[in-house]
Image (tube, rainbow, N blue to C red):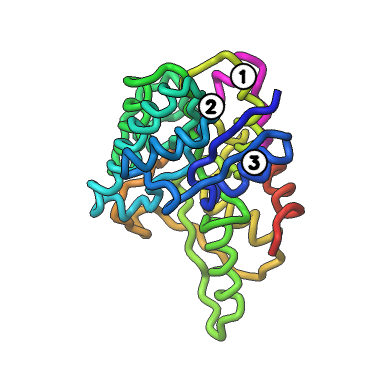
Amino acid sequence: MAKKILIIGSNGQLGYDLVNQANLAGHFVIPTDYPLVDLLDKSSVEACVDEAAPDVIVNCAAFTAVDDCETMREEAFALNADACGVLASAAKKHSALLVHFSTDYVFDGLAEAPYTEDSRPNPQSAYGKSKRRGEEAIAEIYDNFMIFRIAWLYGTHGNNFVKTIRWMATSASRAKEKKPLKIVNDQFGTPTWTVSVCRQVLAMLGRPERGIFHCTSEGFCSWYDFARELVSAYGISADLEPCTTKEFPRPAPRPAYGVLENARLKSIDMNIMPDWRDAFKEFLEYRKD
């Protein structure tokens, strides 16, 4: 059944593709983004939702600059946590389903097996803590919600690992002094295409289940493994060299192991997330350069 869907953050990496996929699926889509709606302004959010009167509110907006969150903690919590409570209240007023996105960063990355929805969150970074607080804020106010934890996201729109490594590898291959490009090889996760997430979320809109769902592609790899895959796919003759996280220090700690298991989706036979390699192949055919 077609839904009236308000998509907030429609100009972002995930929101952009969700607008397209929801339209293709026959839904009535109302896309919006800052400054048309300001998630830091309660009255702006309320006015936006009141005017749209949607069946579903999807929040794709977030403060995702992980390192900047360490020094801009107040701003990160305002957008990733406080705004979630405001959205939950607005959704509750209209009895709308609230769909929100979270992250593998809510875990500490110390596990040796994939995290399920029942695993205990233990975020280590300001980003992870703000996203976890956002999950809690929604659950404290409203019960008609779906939160999808995603990870290692890439797509045709916005900045991501695929675009960064492609640019860096191309630059390295063209340089007169060809130095190897160092890529971290001791952080593990699952590359996940935005369109795969969109398809999964849209498939869930008619389901009665609520709460938190893990939503990543199947399988896992290191950043170095993923870089090798994409350099090969793009036919770039760059020399990649594996390195450790310690050799590439960043302000915010990264989960060494951020692999998520889509346990709840599988338990209701609704997991349609593909293997990450298969999704990447489809992305290569789908992308618009």
Q: Name the quadrant of the N terminus.
A: top right
Q: Secondary structure at mark 2?
A: loop
Kindly identify the amino acid type of the residue bearing the numbered disc 3.
Trp
Magenta segment: 258-275
* Residue occupying image coordinates x 41% and y 54%: 244
Q: Position of residue 207 (x, y in %)?
A: 61, 17
Report if residue 260 lies within the magenta region. yes
Kindly identify the amino acid type of the residue bearing the numbered disc 2.
Glu
Callout 1–callout 2 Cβ contact below 8 Å: yes
The numbered disc on residue 254 is none
| Residue identified by numbered label 3 | 276
Q: Main secondary structure of the magenta part?
A: loop
| Nearer the observer, 1 or 232 | 1
Q: Residues within 10 Å of mark 3 (few under 14, many from 20)?
A: many
* Residue occupying image coordinates x 69% and y 60%: 232
The numbered disc on residue 266 is 1
